[in-house]
Amino acid sequence: MSAPALVLTLKNDLSELARIAEEIGPHGESRGWPAKWVMNLNLSLDELITNIVSYGYRDSDEHEIRVTMTEQSGSLVVVLEDDGLAFDPFTDAPEPDLEADVEERPIGGLGVYLVKTLMDEVAYERLDGRNRITLIQRTPE
């Protein structure tokens, strides 16, 4: 029998970011998730959802962003879906220049790099006019 999924439906509003931690922390604790999963997931979702809300829509209409978290074969699998503009953050976002001095680096640009570093696997696909990002965090050894 599989573990119950946590499904969050968020509006495309930055004020919704607070709900992520409010929901993930208690759910993860009840499921016995490693603290690393909760921390990495909160940071990653905060970054990705901020980008979706800030850059993903050409209109000011209300849109839904859906986050589904399931445990599969000892891993945490998170699927983030939105109906924003097609954008693969893992290939379309420029790689940050980590060798440049802090003063010379442009503001921003480290978030997607951080997500790729924190998660064990990341993937993007465009399905039926929707962006789908999959994040996988394996059980720490």
Image: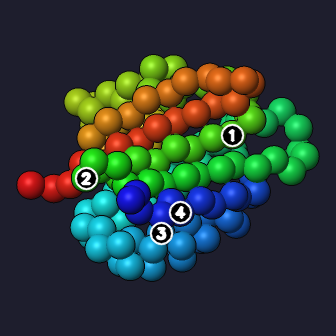
Q: Secondary structure at mark 4?
A: strand
Residue at the spot 9% in from the left edge and 55% down from the top edge: 141
Amino acid marked by disc 2: Gly
- Does dot 1 land on a helix, a strand or a loop? strand
**Residue under numbered circle 1:** 82
Residue 47 place in picture, x, y as percent: 50, 49
Question: Are the residues at dot 4 and dot 1 in contact (C-beta closer than 8 Å)?
Answer: no
Pointers 1 and 2 in contact (C-beta within 8 Å): no
Judged from the image, the secondary structure of the residue bearing numbered disc 3 is helix
For mark 3, what is the residue?
24
Q: Dot 1, crowdedness within 10 Å: few (<14), some or many (≥20)?
A: many
Q: Is residue 7 left or right of residue 59?
A: left
Marks 3 and 2, the one that precedes in the sequence: 3
3 or 1: tag closer to the N-terminus: 3
Per the model, the C-alpha gap separating discs 4 and 2 is 16 Å
Distance from the alpha carbon under mark 4 to that under mark 3: 8 Å
Q: Amino acid at mark 4?
A: Leu
Residue at 69 percent across and 44 percent down: it is 54
CB atoms at circles 3 and 1 under 8 Å apart?
A: no
Determine the residue located farthest toward the left in the rendered image: 141
**Closer to viewer: mark 3 or mark 2:** 2
Dot 4 or dot 3: first in sequence order is 4
Can residue 29 be seen in this snapshot? yes
**Crowd rating for badge 4 (residues with CA inside 10 Å; few <14, some 14–19, many 20+):** some
Q: Is residue 93 above or below residue 78?
A: above
Q: Secondary structure at mark 2?
A: loop
| Whether label 4 touches label 3, CB < 8 Å | yes
**How many residues crowd mark 3 within 10 Å: few (<14), some (14–19), many (20+)?**
many
Q: Which residue is mark 4?
A: 6
Does residue 96 appear to the left or right of 24 in the view shown? Answer: left
